[in-house]
Image (spheres, rainbow, N blue to C red):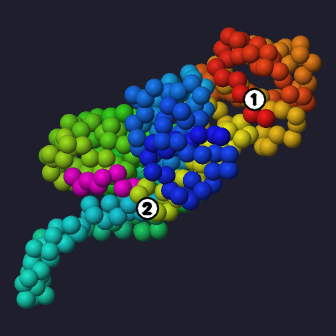
Amino acid sequence: MIKVNCLNPIAKVGMELLPADFGTTGEFAEADAVLVRSAAMHELELPDQLLAVARAGAGVNNIPLDKCAEKGIVVFNTPGANANGVKELVVAAMLLASRDIRGGMQWVEENKDDETINKTMEKAKSKFAGTEIQGKTLGVIGLGAIGVLVANAAVAMGMNVVGCDPFLSVQNALNLSTKVNIVKSNADVYAAADYISVHVPLLDDTKGMINKASLSMMKDNVIILNFARDLLVNEEDLKEALESGKVRKYVTDFPTKNILTANNVIALPHLGASTQESEDNCAIMAVKEIVDYIENGNIKNSVNYPALDMGVCNKASRVSVAHKNVPNIISALTTACGAAGVNIAEINSKAKGDYAYTMMDLDSVPTDEVLDQIAKTAGVIKVRKVK
Ligand code: MLT
């Protein structure tokens, strides 16, 4: 029985995809696979038998990726599965920042007992007036699954859109409206945009990217939207820019106590992917990823190991090896198999940064001695007889 531990509630429609020989456990320490949404995993002791962690979402800053890679634990995410949910909230955020919808609603609530509200509102409404988004320029930093949908939605609403992504994939480029002006640097986005929406992962390189220097390149009265992660923003610098009026509004799905002390902040409690559809899509993708990995050894959408897909094994056996990206591993595998008279029908290997992954389909089932010999090879992290 493969034991799956859910660190957060995961949509039923995904859990129902677990095959009969998979079961759930409430104990992280005994899990073979973990499904997680936003639970912080950095302080958890990773059990030796743990094979995979799947994040039902895109961001993986709650997971210790290197610690997992060092133990041969493959970490998956679900890129694109919640992109529409986030996009729709970004559209709402642009509107909330442009017009005082909240102020107007609050006024109606406060005056709901006024018999003549239909008349008094006509006098009161001027203080809730705003601006339109049509004809304004949206700058999108990061054209991944979410950034592309946001950019396309803005085009459809009559906005001019500039976008920047040094890692733009072919698929995302194909999905992007031809009306989006792709620029070379974030500085070009900052210079052009009335609205800036950030859609990049939180990495060492992106931490604090909205700071004094980038803010100084932006137009006066810019509206900044953050549906990615709080730490992308240097909050002290942003507070200063909000105070001076340089930034008209900051809309964030990642509020902190600190930023909530500033004026002109519109904050939501990490609601971007909190829709039935996004939760279902993420759960389905996450469950499929861990099942395919455990049953077939295939890796799709991992953030700490390379993608490698050999389909379903139709040979006698399949062995997977998670290892360091160092010389001589493949020759050690072929030597161990060759010496034991085990023929390798197919072998594939891929590397990603410091780590690599190799799978072999074999014409006979290797003995435990062969697997032990492979496991002892310098640089090998985890050996698994998948079939
Ligand atoms: C994401 O990174 O995709 C979101 O944070 C997902 C979520 O809300 O759980």
Residue identified by numbered label 1: 385
Using the rendered view, name the quadrant where residue 49 is placed: top right
Question: SS for tag 1?
Answer: strand
Q: Residue at x 74, y 40 (%)?
A: 296
Residue identified by numbered label 2: 275
CB-based contact (under 8 Å), mark 1 and mark 2: no
Verify whether residue 271 appears in magenta. Answer: yes
Magenta stretch bounds: 265-272
Magenta highlight: main SS: loop
Looking at the image, is mark 1 or mark 2 nearer the viewer? Answer: 1
Density class for disc 1 (Cα within 10 Å; few <14, some 14-19, many ≥20) is some
Question: SS for tag 2?
Answer: loop
Counting every numbered tag in the picture gives: 2
Where is 114 relative to 320, above or below? below
Residue 319 is situated, as x and y percent measured from the top left of the image, at 77, 29
Q: Amino acid at mark 2?
A: Thr
**Residue 35 in sight here:** yes
Residue 200 is situated, as x and y percent measured from the top left of the image, at 44, 42
Using the rendered view, name the quadrant where residue 208 is placed: top left
Verify whether residue 204 appears in magenta. Answer: no
From the viewer's perspective, is 332 left or right of 99?
right
**Residue 300 in sight here:** no
